[in-house]
Amino acid sequence: MENSGGIQASLAGRYATALFDLAREAKAIDTVEASLGKLRTAIDESADFRRLTGSPVVSRDGAASAVAAVARSMKLDSLTTRLLGVLAANRRLAQLGAVIASYHALAADHRGETTAHVTSAHPLAAGQVSALKAQLKARIGRDVSVDLDVDPALLGGLVVRIGSQMIDSSIRTRLNSLAHAMKG
């Protein structure tokens, strides 16, 4: 299964592809995606979880038991729980964020969607995400799933990437353009 985005080329992509293939066989693509969404939220919101997944100092056994406890407390599905165990055993927990993004892209492609990577200065409300999806669908003619990130350095506005296209309406970029124009 070759993906045009080169997902399989990376280490995280290989883990995501293996997980996706297992999820497809088990008819659990959406269930796994929901569990990975919980993990993405944990990475974004919990400094302790980020330290666990990013620290090279944590032993394999320590990481494995910690992620097993996390999986139980978050009520993750069995495939996602096994993925965490494999990542911990192979000392690859730092790749978790990239595996999640790669899996999300594979699942979106499976559903016939295009994935837009959206970075905003502040978290977007559900209504804003829905309106953005509708505008992007009208622009490209396909259903669009969004992968959201927050970067306060943007100051305001959005940066949207769909494939090789980028739409940058951030205030930071506008201010930089104005400063450059004023220099003459």
Image (spheres, rainbow, N blue to C red):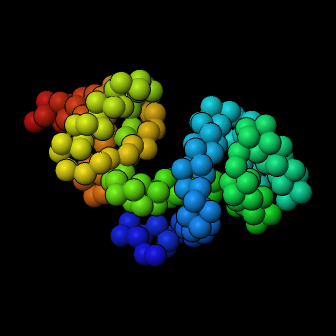
Q: Number of labelled discs? A: 0
Where residue 53 appears, as percent x and y from the top left, is 71, 49
Along the horizontal axis of the image, is 182 left or right of 126? left
Residue sitting at the far bottom? 1
Along the horizontal axis of the image, is 69 left or right of 50? right
Q: Nearer the viewer, residue 94 or 72?
A: 72
Residue at image position (30%, 38%) is 133
Can residue 4 be seen by looking at this rendering?
yes
Q: Nearer the viewer, residue 98 or 22?
A: 22
Can residue 91 be seen by looking at this rendering?
no
Residue at image position (50%, 58%) is 102
Quadrant placement of the C terminus: top left
Residue sitting at the far front? 27
The image shows residue 76, relative to residue 107, as above or below, that is above
Residue sitting at the far left? 184
Where residue 116 appears, as percent x and y from the top left, is 35, 47
Residue at image position (34%, 26%) is 128
Q: Nearer the viewer, residue 127 or 96?
A: 127
Q: Nearer the viewer, residue 112 or 7?
A: 112
Where residue 51 appears, as percent x and y from the top left, is 73, 42
Determine the image quadrant of residue 174: top left
Where residue 126 appears, as percent x and y from the top left, is 41, 26
